Structures are given as structure tokens and as C-alpha cells.
């Protein structure tokens, strides 16, 4: 066959190259779901994780664990969404629901956190599976003393706005 006067050859090499590119694209897509902080930064050629100091946080849900980078100043809700971890956040972090409820596993790290505000406590009162170390993920920001934090995501949430709706991560 010809294309604009040029002969187009369908060789085995071209087919293998196309298959290899498809595999690379699939691998890249999987790796970018792992963490957006490991993607190359357009401006500097470094990764966003290198550009911004990161801690680590481990999310636990239904027996599975995900340990991910946690950039300084970002909330648990933000980092969960950036890493495709199911933490609902129906109000998008506006402190108007309890769907981003998490349970801090290590009481000594819980004690290092800022006290929950009255508004956060009011929302926590509505949370499913409330414990003494419960917090809203939208209100817990990365600070150096929280490096290595482990939080459990309860098996259910109470979303009074639309029960059963799971918003897409931001």
C-alpha cells in the first residue's frame, strides 16, 4: 500500500515495535496510578517528590496496606485521592461531612497532632466506627512529627447527602 506516494511497509519489526509501545504505555499508566509524586516534573526534570519534601503515610483498609509519599502541608484526604486510595471525602475537604474519617493506629502519633477543632469534633460525632484516635482525613496535614503515620480507613462511611455515591478523586 502507498500513502501520499510513499510505500508503507507492514513488517514484523513494525508490529513488534507497536506491541512494545503498547506494553510500555500500560506499564507507565500503572506506575502513575501508584503515586503522582513520582512523575517527572515538566519544569525541572526531577520528580515532584524531589521538588517537595515528603513524609510517608500508610493507609490500611480491609486488610490491605498502601504506603505512599505524603508531601508536607497536604492532607491525608488529598494524598489518598492522589494515590487512588478509596477515602471518600464527599464534601471535598470543606469540613461538612465525616466521610474522610480515619483511625490513627499509633496513639503516640495521635498525641502529636493538633487538637481537632470544634467543627471537626461535630463532624466526627457523625462518623461510622468512631474511636478515641479518630480524625477527619481532610484536617490532618503532613508535619515532620507525623512521618510514618499509619491510619485505618473504616469499612463504611455515613454520607447523609447521597448514600451510596462515591465521588471521583480530585
Image (tube, rainbow, N blue to C red):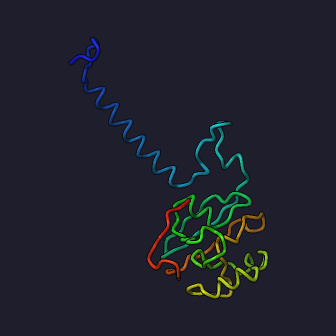
Q: Going by the picture, which residue comes out furthest to the left?
A: 1
Relative depth, front residue between 168 and 54: 168
Q: Which image quadrant for residue 149?
A: bottom right
Task: Identify the residue at horizontal 70%, vertical 56% (top origin).
Answer: 54
Relative depth, front residue between 100 and 41: 100
- Residue 58 percent coordinates (x, y): 61, 67
Task: Identify the residue at horizontal 33%, vertical 33% (top origin).
Answer: 18
Q: Quadrant of the C terminus?
A: bottom right
Above-or-below relation of 102 to 13: below
Q: Tally the numbered discs.
A: 0
Task: Identify the residue at horizontal 46%, vertical 79% (top origin).
Answer: 163
Above-or-below relation of 47 to 168: above
Q: Which image quadrant for residue 76?
A: bottom right
Above-or-below relation of 46 to 130: above
- Residue 60 percent coordinates (x, y): 55, 73
Relative depth, front residue between 92 and 61: 92
Q: Going by the picture, which residue comes out furthest to the top?
A: 5
Above-or-below relation of 114 to 26: below
Q: Which image quadrant for residue 122?
A: bottom right
- Residue 121 percent coordinates (x, y): 70, 84
Q: Quadrant of the N terminus?
A: top left
Relative depth, front residue between 128 and 59: 128
Amino acid at each position: 500500500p502507498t500513502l501520499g506516494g510513499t510505500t508503507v511497509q507492514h513488517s514484523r519489526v513494525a508490529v513488534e515495535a507497536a506491541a512494545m509501545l503498547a506494553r510500555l504505555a500500560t506499564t507507565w499508566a500503572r506506575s502513575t496510578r501508584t503515586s503522582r509524586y513520582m512523575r517527572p516534573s515538566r519544569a525541572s526534570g526531577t520528580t515532584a517528590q524531589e521538588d517537595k519534601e515528603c513524609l510517608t503515610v500508610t493507609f490500611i483498609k480491609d486488610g490491605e496496606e498502601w504506603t505512599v509519599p505524603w508531601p508536607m502541608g497536604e492532607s491525608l484526604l488529598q494524598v489518598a485521592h492522589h494515590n487512588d486510595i478509596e477515602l471518600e471525602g464527599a464534601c471535598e475537604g470543606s469540613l461538612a461531612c465525616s466521610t474522610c474519617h480515619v483511625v490513627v493506629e499509633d496513639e503516640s502519633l495521635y498525641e502529636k497532632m493538633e487538637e481537632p477543632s470544634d467543627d471537626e469534633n461535630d463532624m466526627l460525632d457523625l462518623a461510622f466506627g468512631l474511636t478515641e484516635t479518630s480524625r477527619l482525613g481532610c484536617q490532618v496535614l503532613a508535619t515532620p512529627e507525623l512521618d510514618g503515620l499509619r491510619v485505618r480507613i473504616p469499612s463504611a462511611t455515613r454520607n447523609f447527602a447521597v448514600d451510596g455515591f462515591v465521588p471521583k478523586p480530585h
